[in-house]
Amino acid sequence: FKINMDEIEVLGELGKGNYGSVHKVFHRPTNVEMAMKEIRLELDESKLNGIIMELDILHRAVAPEIVEFYGAFTIESCVYYCMEYMDAGSLDTLTGGGVLAKDQKEDGAGVTGGDAAERVPEGVLRRITASMIRGLKFLKDELQIMHRDVKPTNVLINKKGEIKLCDFGVSGQLEKSLAKTNIGCQSYMAPERIKSETANQNPTYTVSSDVWSVGLSIIELAKGCYPYPPETYSNVFAQLQAIVNGAPPTLPPGYSDDANDFVAKCLMKDPNQRPTYAQLLEHPFLVADKDAEVDMVGWVAAALDRRAARGISTLNPIQA
Ligand code: ADP
């Protein structure tokens, strides 16, 4: 079926991204709550229609680890993209973002009980990682695409404890139009990709660049803040330097050797040395996830309570 704006009731704002905002909406004909992303583009009608056609491939992106796509349409110079509503939001707001990092420093990390209670348990970290890798492997094997934008804001979670990826690059035209505004202050790009993009060459990076971004995202999840030092937050140049020339970040203390080894392999500076998705799924860290009992529902509920206590609601999360 085709979705259009007349059938949609806007319920509230879920968040703001780099290119527009995301609203929670109600689709009357189907009785389904959806998330609707608005992407503002300065493009002519034929290019906008091209994007809508390219997005059509998303109807084939049906997997437990992928946020379901319902449809897209354009109004004037905006693309509206309707997808499954994930009622616990994105991973970054769930685990604290920069807020937690600051609190930890003031308390003395690891000393107070409150700090320990907020640390993401290894089982949860493993389950989230396994979902991300399975989702990325699905995109690569079934749709022949790489994600290109793996980061905690693009990993969504719901109260059932399901973890799903969104915002992957299916539309060449859309990617091209967004690329101009691409430089954010917290980069999840692999070193080889930064080198390729800053040299203005044709992109030479491959799917293993996504593996790097997974490694960085897992560390952020475990630490509760972006893994590179705060001095680099406001200085894009220093940050890219640190990623390209510095040692890769590591997990905070308290995680197993398997977890540390897994992350180190994702963050090999040489992309050829990073494992494939199939290899990562065979890694002891993820193999241990298969039979593990993990209370994801309980963890999400507790994380939502903590988020509410910080004054961040699901419907109007404050962006870091
Ligand atoms: P970015 O450009 O940083 O990737 P997005 O525009 O994709 O951000 O999304 C902004 C915020 O909207 C996200 O951080 C998330 O909290 C919320 N959001 C996006 N998609 C959904 C969804 N399907 N369900 C619930 N919340 C969502």
Image (cartoon, grey):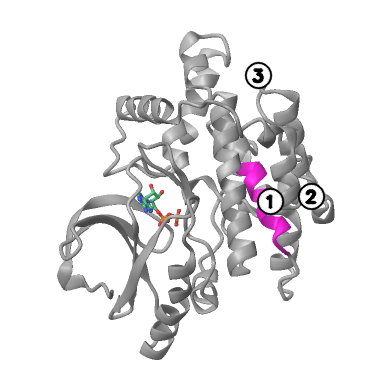
Question: Which image quarter is the C terminus in?
Answer: top left
Kind of residue sitting beneath label 1: Val
Secondary structure state at the residue bearing disc 3: loop
Residue 218 colored in magenta in the image: no
Q: Are marks 2 and 1 in contact (CB under 8 Å)?
A: yes
Per the image, the residue denoted by label 3 is: 254
Q: Position of residue 150 (x, y in %)?
A: 57, 53
First-in-chain label (1 vs 3): 1
Query: Residue at 32% of width from left, 43% of height from top?
Result: 87
Instruction: Examine the rendering and report whether any part of residue 173 can be seen.
Output: yes
Q: What residue is at 60 percent from the left and 25 percent from the top?
A: 122
Q: Position of residue 193 (x, y in %)?
A: 71, 61
Which quarter of the figure has residue 252? top right
Residue under circle 1? 211
Residue that lies at the very extreme toward the bottom in this rendered image? 46
- In the image, is residue 211 part of the stretch drawn in magenta? yes
Q: Is mark 1 within 8 Å of ligand 1?
A: no
Q: Secondary structure at mark 1?
A: helix
Identify the residue under disc 2. 274
Q: Nearer the viewer, residue 169 or 112?
A: 169
Residues rendered magenta in the picture: 206-217
Q: Residue at x 52, y 28 (%)?
A: 101
Mark found first going from the N terminus, 2 or 1: 1
Q: Quadrant of the N terminus?
A: bottom left
Contact flag, marks 3 and 2 (Cβ < 8 Å): no
